[in-house]
Image: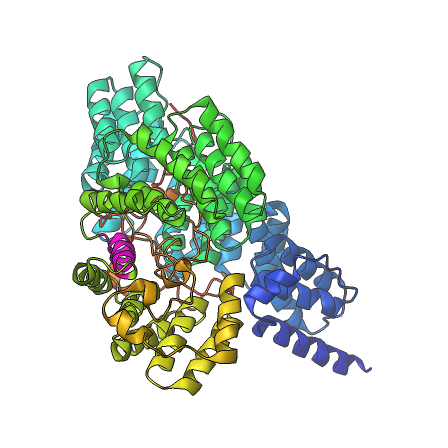
């Protein structure tokens, strides 16, 4: 083949590989479970693209590098593109020394590449070449996502050179809105405290704290500055006020203990590298919240390059990889959290749930039991254990674990509603309805009108032919709060069906299917409703679609039977109108089949497959969705205080309503060429602190010293 033909072919191959999704992400992930060793350059290129598509960063880096070294790609544009892809893959996989080498190659090709200059700037900062670091970071200002973050990182180059006052001036010169001013004062306050300029540090950190008292990193830095200035009582007031909202926060608890014990209190950061790492972690957390996984991984990796033992970065990145369905990487990162960090115990709890995700359930359970044995009052570990049992349909054990959690709680507050809710689910599954009903009512007493509980209890009443009007009102109220929640809308439609209101059932179930088109239970429900109003051809279509969606084995058999014989149309319709569940149209189904869709799944609307997590008063999110009765409940995770989402985060240029929607995490983007940079969240507008959440983890500061 002539050289020109070969180069054209290589360029075309590269274009196809880099612009086309080879297969659905789920299929791609499954394919990578098997050892795959491409034997050609083109095979390596395609394998790299496949690995990148499922966020398998280690393999992506390896395959791209192999393709690049093959010599097949002679076309200059093709080699440039592949060089950039290799650079990004090395960066996201954490191979930082190689990423730095490739960053230099990228800059030689593209002199204004912002991500390459960012990496080179961080490399210079790490090596204490502060002037070079500033020069490199100056090339990053054309990208919106870097316009605020990198100038603030640059201020730490002055602090590293012992020129703190210049760093303060440079920080003040950064134009910003009110939200970013909080972030600037947080950063500058830490810089001043590190330099021993305590009065100035306290003034800056006080301002940041007054703007955002929910950011644990601000609370930590401010309390440290106060304690170091001899104002220990004031420091304890700040910490205890936070603890009243977020009990058991490990960083805060450790600092309280150290102050009371009279220990010497260190500043929040002690080096310029730690200060810059804090900025990177905060930006990463903000981007991750908005679905910018690619950028978030880059910033977390750079933070760890500066400070490898940064517990908040390790845990934040581990949680991100868990969300991206890469539990093997998450496991490694959780295990890397230093034993000296106050966050180590939180990492151990999250490690257990990650082991369960890897189908190492016995290992995960044993891990949690070991933690609980060491501290029987460890509520987070107990709740996580109950969640794993729910996930695995071990309902009896789940009820025992959640009962232990209730005993530890003692006097429950609004934040504890989820524990009663999940214990209620476990009781209901083992046919102890009176106990389940009492728990659901208790959850509503603690958190009135909580939509998941309204949905579950209301549907259960209708399913049993009791409190029909009240049950329907509960479900409608839940739908009003979550009109786009397919599981709750399904419950309303199925309740209509159970009451013989078939036309209304069809209307609601069609909408539920449009919201959750791949859920087998919802499709099965719609098929039943179609049959009842005489739309039998459409009914069979929905049942076939339900089969394609892989229902549980017992439900699969029932759907197949309906496809073969149809449904019985005798007196059952009249029975359902009277609420006689024993003779309802669904009497042929098991009790589970009539339960609200997805009652055991958690409700994080952005991530419906995530494990339910224990409530966080400071960072509330939407409560759990009820799950399909035949699907296992995912494990409630601990109230992990380590997630850096609570760190102060630079504000975007727009209001929260204008921020970009979460990106499709199944299709990674090239961080060096963003189409629209995700904006970190605005610290000036924290979540409503007193609200309980659907179990989410409050964040911790990026420093990992305990005091």
Between 40 and 367, the residue placed more toward the observer is 367
Q: Decide whether the magenta segment is chiefly helix, strand or loop.
A: helix
Q: Nearer the viewer, residue 187 or 511?
A: 511
Magenta highlight on residue 459: yes
The answer to which of 68 and 634 lies nearer the viewer is: 634
- Position of 380 with respect to 497 (left or right) is right
Residue 79 x %, y %: 66, 68
Quadrant into which the N terminus falls = bottom right
| Residue 337: image location, x then y, percent | 51, 34
- The residue stretch that appears in magenta: 450-462
The magenta stretch spans residue 135: no
Locate residue 28: give its quadrant: bottom right
What residue is rendered at 29% in x and 20% in y? 228
Residue 125: x and y, percent?
49, 41
**Which residue corresponds to the image point at 35% horizontal and 14% vertical from the top-left?**
263
Q: Position of residue 30 (x, y in %)?
A: 62, 61
User: Position of 45 compared to 568: left or right?
Assistant: right
Examine the rendering and report whether any part of residue 565 can be seen: yes
Tell me which colouring the rendered structure shows.
rainbow
Can residue 132 be seen in the rendering of this structure? no
Q: Dividing the picture into quarters, in which one does residue 606 lie?
A: bottom left
Residue 476 as seen in the image, left or right of residue 615: left
Q: Quadrant of the C terminus?
A: top left
Q: Going by the image, does 117 lie left or right of 241?
A: right
Q: How many marks?
A: 0
């Amino acid at each position: 083949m002539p050289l020109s033909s070969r180069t054209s072919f290589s360029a075309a191959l590269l274009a196809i590989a880099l612009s086309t999704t080879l297969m659905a992400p789920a299929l791609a992930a499954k394919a990578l479970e098997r050892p795959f060793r491409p034997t050609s350059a083109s095979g390596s290129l395609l394998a790299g693209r496949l690995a990148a598509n499922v966020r398998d960063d280690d393999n992506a880096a390896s395959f791209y590098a192999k393709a690049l070294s093959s010599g097949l790609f002679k076309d200059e544009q093709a080699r440039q593109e592949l060089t950039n892809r290799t650079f990004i893959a090395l960066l996201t996989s954490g191979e930082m020394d190689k990423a730095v080498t490739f960053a230099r190659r990228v800059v030689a090709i593209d002199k204004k590449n912002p991500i390459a200059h960012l990496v080179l700037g961080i490399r210079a900062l790490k090596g204490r070449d502060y002037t070079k670091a500033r020069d490199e970071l100056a090339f990053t200002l054309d990208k919106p996502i870097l316009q605020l973050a990198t100038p603030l990182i640059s201020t730490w180059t002055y602090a590293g050179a012992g020129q703190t006052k210049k760093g303060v001036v440079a920080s003040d010169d950064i134009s910003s809105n009110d939200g970013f001013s909080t972030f600037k004062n947080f950063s500058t306050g830490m810089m001043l405290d590190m330099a021993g300029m305590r009065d100035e540090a306290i003034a800056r950190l006080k301002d940041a704290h007054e703007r955002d008292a929910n950011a644990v990193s601000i609370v930590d830095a401010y309390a440290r500055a106060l304690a170091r200035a001899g104002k220990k009582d004031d420091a304890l007031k700040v910490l205890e006020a936070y603890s009243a909202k977020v009990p058991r926060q490990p960083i805060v608890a450790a600092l309280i203990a150290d102050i009371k014990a009279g220990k010497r209190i260190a500043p929040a950061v002690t080096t310029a590298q730690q200060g810059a790492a804090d900025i990177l972690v905060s930006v990463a957390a903000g981007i991750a919240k908005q679905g910018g996984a690619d950028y978030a991984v880059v910033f977390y990796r750079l933070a760890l390059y500066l400070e490898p033992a940064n517990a908040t970065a390790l845990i934040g990145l581990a949680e991100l990889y868990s969300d991206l369905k890469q539990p093997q990487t998450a496991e490694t990162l959780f295990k890397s959290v230093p034993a000296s960090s106050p966050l180590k115990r939180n990492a151990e709890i999250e490690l257990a749930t990650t082991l369960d995700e890897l189908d190492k359930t016995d290992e995960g359970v044993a891990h949690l039991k070991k933690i609980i044995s060491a501290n029987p009052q460890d509520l987070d570990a107990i709740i996580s254990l109950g969640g794993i049992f729910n996930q695995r349909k071990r309902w009896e054990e789940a009820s025992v674990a959640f009962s232990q959690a209730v005993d530890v709680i003692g006097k429950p507050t609004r934040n504890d509603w989820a524990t009663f809710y999940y214990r209620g689910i476990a009781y209901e599954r083992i046919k102890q309805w009176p106990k389940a009903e009492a728990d659901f009512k208790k959850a509503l007493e603690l958190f009135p009108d909580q939509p998941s509980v309204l949905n579950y209890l209301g549907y259960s009443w209708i399913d049993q032919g009791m409190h029909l009007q009240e049950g329907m009102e509960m479900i409608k109220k839940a739908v009003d709060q979550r009109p786009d929640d397919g599981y709750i809308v399904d419950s309303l439609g199925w309740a209509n069906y159970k009451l013989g209101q078939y036309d209304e059932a069809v209307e609601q179930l069609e909408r539920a299917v449009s919201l959750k088109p791949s859920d087998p239970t919802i499709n099965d429900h719609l098929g039943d409703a179609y049959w009842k109003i005489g739309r039998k051809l459409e009914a069979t279509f929905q049942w076939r679609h339900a089969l394609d969606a892989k229902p549980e084995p017992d439900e699969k058999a029932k759907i197949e039977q309906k496809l073969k014989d149809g449904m019985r149309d005798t007196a059952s319709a009249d029975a359902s109108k009277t609420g006689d569940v024993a003779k309802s149209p669904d009497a042929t189904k098991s009790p589970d089949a009539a339960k609200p869709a997805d009652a055991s799944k958690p409700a994080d609307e952005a991530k419906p497959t995530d494990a339910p997590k224990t409530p966080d008063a400071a960072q509330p999110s939407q409560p759990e969705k009820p799950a399909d009765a035949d699907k296992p409940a995912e494990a409630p995770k601990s109230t992990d205080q380590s997630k850096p989402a609570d760190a102060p985060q630079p504000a975007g240029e727009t209001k929260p309503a204008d921020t970009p929607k979460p990106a499709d995490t199944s299709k990674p983007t090239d961080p060096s060429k963003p189409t629209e940079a995700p904006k970190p969240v605005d610290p000036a507008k924290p979540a409503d602190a007193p609200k309980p959440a659907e179990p989410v983890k409050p964040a911790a500061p990026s420093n990992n010293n305990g005091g």
